[in-house]
Image: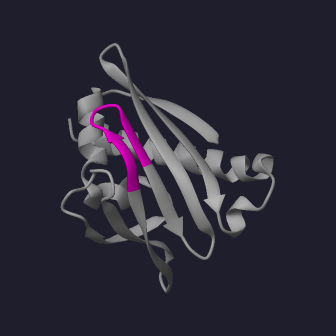
Amino acid sequence: MSRNSRLIHATPDQVWSVLADGWLYPLWVVGASRMREVDESWPAVGSKLYHSVGTWPLLIDDNSEVLEARPGSLLKLRARAWPAGEAEVVLRLEPSGADTEVVIEEDAVSGPAALGPKALRDVPLAWRNVETLRRLAFVVEGRL
């Protein structure tokens, strides 16, 4: 899995409050362009976000499902973006003094995106997730 981390100047609960609001997903996830629906039980295991990826008019409607959730510490997702495939994404929130280190791990698990060598998949995922964590920090810290 590609792994990136960033220190966010907020508590784990404050970071979790953004992760737990599915309607904010396109504000911080690179590639997500709009939300269509959020299950009422989000972010409970099995709940889904219904999002679109891409840029209009070339949008793909798909979803992301929660595989594991521990409020304030972990969110594990199966993100779908067919025809590219599916990815597993893990967000870990680790207290660091008054701040939170957010670690994101991601890798393609099915579809064409999973067929290439891992070393080649990691390069664009690392770039994408640096920006994803930057955006997440802006959203979280901007709410304080």
Q: Quadrant of residue 24?
A: bottom left
Is residue 43 shown left or right of residue 83? left
- Residue at 49 percent of width and 80 percent of height: 59
State which region is magenta.
66-76
Q: Was residue 73 drawn as part of the magenta stretch in this picture?
A: yes
Tell which residue pokes out farthest to the top in this image: 97
- Residue at 78 percent of width and 51 percent of height: 120
- Residue 52: % across, % down: 43, 73
Quarter of the picture containing the N terminus is: top right
Is residue 133 shown left or right of residue 35? right
- Residue 91: % across, % down: 44, 40
- Residue 55: % across, % down: 50, 76
Q: Quadrant of residue 16?
A: top left
Q: Was residue 57 drawn as part of the magenta stretch in this picture?
A: no
Above or below — where is 121 with respect to 38? above
- Residue 138: % across, % down: 36, 42
